[in-house]
Image (cartoon, rainbow, N blue to C red):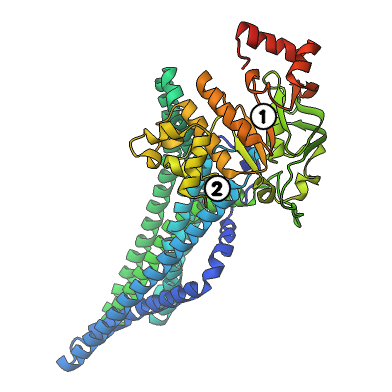
Amino acid sequence: MARAPQTQLEDRPTTKRIGALRALVPFVKPYSGQVLAALMALVLTASISLILPLAVRRVVDGFQAGAQLLDQYFGAALVIVVLLALGTGARYYLVTRLGERVVADIRKAVFDRVLGMSPAFFERIMTGEVISRITTDTTLILSVIGSSVSVALRNVLVLVGGMAMLLLTSGKLTGLVLLVVPFVVAPIVVLGRRLRVLGRENQDWIANSAGSASEALLSAQTVQAFTHEAQTRADFAGVTEKAFTSALHRISTRAVMTVIVIFLIFSGVLGVLWVGARDVRLEVMTVGQLVQFVIYAIMVAGAVGALSEIWGEIQRAAGATERLAELLGAEDPVHDPAAPAVLPRPVRGEISFDDVTFHYPSRPSASALDGVSLHIAPGETVALVGPSGAGKTTMIQLIQRFWDPEQGRVTLDGHDLRSLARADFRRAIALVPQDPVIFAASARENIRFGRPEASDAEVEAAARAAHAHDFLTALPEGYNSYVGERGVMLSGGQKQRIAIARAILRDAPVLLLDEATSALDSESEGLVQAAVERLASGRTTVIVAHRLATVKRADRIVVFDQGRIVAQGTHEALVAENGLYARLARLQFTIGTVEG
């Protein structure tokens, strides 16, 4: 049987036990009052269910009694039925409400945990798989908390209470019933283990399918541009079919278990009925007693059958809980200190790299940065240039502490970033990435993402400064126009200008520009470059660029090659040195080639 691909996160040993459900306790504990109320309703309905056969016995054995007494029996039975209906309704409401509340809390907890993870986490697990866990796995848990556990507990009470009443009704017949129990329990235990493994495997394949779909749909234009639709459809179909095959194995095992259990249970009931009927003919017991025993036997048999069904659901939920617990317990190599230092305000923007060495986990043999030392003064504009893969973007990422250096340290205003809370120092940073992120919202909300409390006037002022105002007002609903998922309704240059407006609105003392004008035409680039220069005034600005025309007026240009600083100075001084920078400059300014 094929096994689902495992992420490194899932390679850790798993419990493979129902005990995995203990991870739900912290989420259920805050609602102990609701749990107690649900248990009370549960005990009430189970107790009433166990009383009903006694009422039936009274009616059957007293059938020849007077009409008045018979009416009383039926009246009492009706009261019991009303109480059963009310108790069942209360139990359903309380348990279902509890399930929805707990699952909502789990979803929020997992999302909150994953959202703060560093890029290292997402090198090990696909975003689509995380989404699958938040949706599919929590749905399984909902079915258990909101239904299966309640039904299981009710059936346990009915099973225990029913067995006690069977003993009181007829010890002989109860002994015969107990002979069947080991034959019923054995397949539940043996096949239940198999179901747990298959349930976990099925969830892995579902998550893999979701990850595949997410990746393909987020790259739909690229897929279409390379006419790769057929292969992508085939890949997704293959993963989906494996998920179906895995589910089919689980369903088949569950069906076999159900057939065996039901056959054994009702065969045993028929055998007991045969013996009981003979006892009635011999007047060892009354008809009412036999009817009472039969009802209790059916209730017990039904409880065992229901428990065998629910057992599979609980095991699937245990697997889902295990997977969610992995996310909640995942270790992030980048984390805030237990007692973070406080970054003094106002932030001056002094940035230092002190002998920093760093390797990406996915490329441990290649140094992204190798012993880099660089000091950026407050208010200075520094441009980082060099060939692709030289370490420029890594510098930007380390300034934001998406990664921690393996050696050396990165400081802001003299404070090691590892000593600060990430949310604290990141408030002092504005970023314009190479691939701007545009959310499925209005243009106004996308700009306001830089500073949520900003007024409409401030949003529009930032858009004007980024030279985005004209194209935004030309949209059907102006600034309130919906721009589509990932900004699909905008051009590359328009998306970049919205990202620049967002950074302008943030008004942070440190500005990071990672190829911020790469998607602009020459005219727009000139306009935005002028806006960036105004924005950079009085701020510490770090610019990563391949297009050297955008960095000529920087206070200092730092040249990187193979993770090291090989030169630094002004544009004129670096050209005069006739080194790597001069070679790049000749390629761009003489031949017009843009190094990418």
Q: Nearer the viewer, residue 275 or 438?
A: 438
Q: Earlier in the sequence, mark 2 or mark 1?
A: 2
Q: Residues within 10 Å of mark 1 (few under 14, many from 20)?
A: many
Reading the image, the residue beneath label 2 is 451
Is residue 365 placed above or below 586 in the rendered structure? below
Residue 531 in the image: x percent, y percent? 57, 31
Task: Confirm whether residue 135 shows in the render.
Answer: yes
Which residue is rendered at x = 26% and y = 87% of the image? Answer: 76
Q: Is residue 577 left or right of residue 310?
A: right
Q: Is residue 445 left or right of residue 62?
A: right
Give the residue type at disc 1.
Ile
Reading the image, the residue beneath label 1 is 543
Give the CA distance from mark 2 to mark 1: 22 Å
- The quadrant of the image that shows the C terminus is top right
Residue 2 in the image: x percent, y percent? 52, 33
Task: Confirm whether residue 201 shows in the render.
Answer: no
Q: Count the numbered circles shown.
A: 2
Which residue is rendered at x = 56% and y = 57% of the image? Answer: 18
Residue 560, quarter of picture? top right
Q: Is residue 418 left or right of residue 248?
A: right
Give the residue type at disc 2.
Arg
Residue 208 in the image: x percent, y percent? 50, 36
Q: Is residue 72 left or right of residue 371?
A: left
